[in-house]
Image (cartoon, rainbow, N blue to C red):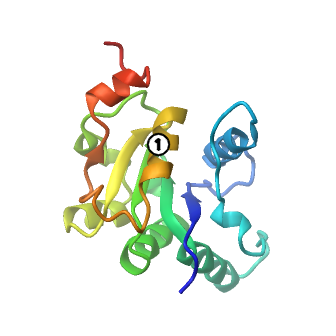
Amino acid sequence: MAYRNGTYIAFHAGGTTDPTASDIKYYNTMKMWSANKKIEFTLINSHEKTSAVRDSSTKETLRRSLVARLNNSKHMVLVLTATTKNDTDWVPFEIAHAIDVCQIPIIAVYPDYDWILGPAELSNYWPQALASRIKNGTARVIHVPFKLPAVLDAIEQFGVSNITYPTDGYGFYSRETQVRWGLIKP
């Protein structure tokens, strides 16, 4: 069995490699947080654990690479924006493999929100692959805003070896925790 210590980050690329025109900017933000010496954030990036693939790679080559990366991951950070549900190829594949095969928890991050207290209210952001697995009870998901303290805490706490939380598809941090982080005004 593989050593599962990586963070797999999934996002909707929108059919472009332009970092300003797709959700890759959130992936790049996480890499910047990790590189910043003033921020206590370490990202063990699953995407850097296997050889790179290019846009010219075959779908099968890309699929094999994604599977290898997911198999070595302890959780998945899934960036959810208004366009993520429109992805019909790689994001649904990544979600299905992460939950059905790897059985890793999903850290669902929402750049459009400053705080989250009702994950079910965000279901319009969920791709069908995620929504169906939340509904049937196979997904373990913590829903957090795309804010450093929330993302950092979730990455530190929730992994394949932590089977106690989240226990279902509707996990979120308490109001008190989000107030303490400065995300919600007291």
Q: Quadrant of residue 13?
A: bottom right
Quadrant into which the C terminus falls = top left
Q: Position of residue 180 (x, y in %)?
A: 38, 23
Identify which residue, 168 or 43, lies in the foreground.
43
Left or right, residue 136 beside residue 65: left
Residue in the picture at 79% in, 74% down: 56
Q: Position of residue 107 (x, y in %)?
A: 43, 52
Query: Can the viewer see residue 87?
Result: no
Q: Position of residue 73 (x, y in %)?
A: 54, 69
Count the labels in the image.
1
Q: Position of residue 101 (x, y in %)?
A: 41, 81
Q: Secondary structure at mark 1?
A: helix
128 w.r.t. 150: above or below: below
For label 1, the crowd category at 10 Å Cα-Cα, with few meaning under 14, some 14 to 19 and many 20 or more, is few
Left or right, residue 146 beside residue 38: left
Give the labeled residue for mark 1.
153
Residue in the picture at 34% in, 55% down: 141
Q: The residue under label 1 is which amino acid type?
A: Asp
Residue in the picture at 70% in, 54% down: 16
100 w.r.t. 42: above or below: below
155 w.r.t. 62: above or below: above
